Amino acid sequence: MTLAILNCAPEKSEELELSLSTENGQLIGLMRPFTARLLQEAAVIEKLTEWRKVNMANFLTHFEATPARTRGWLQKVLLADPGQMLWLIYDESDSLVGHFGFKNLTENAVMLDNAMRGERQGHPKLLVMAGKALIDWLWRMTPVKRIHAYVLTDNVPSIMMNRQIGFQGWVRYPLVKRLEEGETHWELGSEGECSPDDRYCFGLFVERNK
């Protein structure tokens, strides 16, 4: 199965499911990809919107999150892009508690993003296992050689999570603020430079075992 096949056959996406287990084999949850069917699930859209509102400071783009905007992004950006997926994370009782995704998929690399734990319930390492499962799935299903990620230097929980997932590099980049139509966009500067707003992020990576 390839990502192109998933886009051409939505029913195949509905069948996808990744089990999440601890190192000792304890099943703690699962992940399923967001599909077009879920665009009509108001409860899911509301949760994704509320999580974004609460955690807006941990993203590089700040805006007013609404259900309409969330649904529009999911439909017009996420589902329309063959190089992007968002996986919903469920705990052991099948309750939706977060999500993890990727974008900018090419033959050589991909960016992991949209890691979010919206609810406190579930196993403490649920997001760590979700990240590991997603990376393993990408190694199996795509030819990518390197997986990238960015994390803000003041986002301690995300730093701890990504270290446990196995990311390397940890190169610090300055962030430069740009305002556009009432929104705040934080853009990456060059390694070694200073941020005029004293805000930075780490660039991370993990590579395929040869």
Image: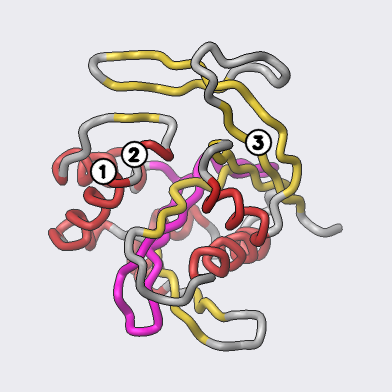
Looking at the image, residue 15 sits to the left or right of residue 19; the answer is left
| The C terminus sits in image quarter | bottom right
> Which element carries disc 2, helix, strand or loop?
helix
> Which element carries disc 3, helix, strand or loop?
strand
**Circle nearer the viewer, 3 or 2:** 2
**Mark number displayed over residue 53:** 1
Distance from the alpha carbon under mark 3 to that under mark 2: 19 Å
Dot 1 or dot 3: first in sequence order is: 1
Identity, as a three-letter code, of the amino acid under mark 3: Gly
Distance from the alpha carbon under mark 1 to that under mark 2: 5 Å
Residue annotated with mark 3: 203
Q: Position of residue 164 (x, y in %)?
A: 66, 61
Q: Magenta residues?
A: 81-110
Residue annotated with mark 2: 56
Which residue is rendered at x = 34% and y = 39% of the image? 56
Dot 3 or dot 2: first in sequence order is: 2
Q: In terms of image quadrants, where is residue 57?
A: top left
Q: Residue furthest right?
A: 210
The residue nearer to you, when weighing 113 against 11, is: 113
For the residues labelled 1 and 3, say whether their Cβ atoms are less than 8 Å apart.
Answer: no
The residue nearer to you, when weighing 56 against 40, is: 56
- Local crowd at mark 1 within 10 Å, few (<14), some, or many (≥20)? some
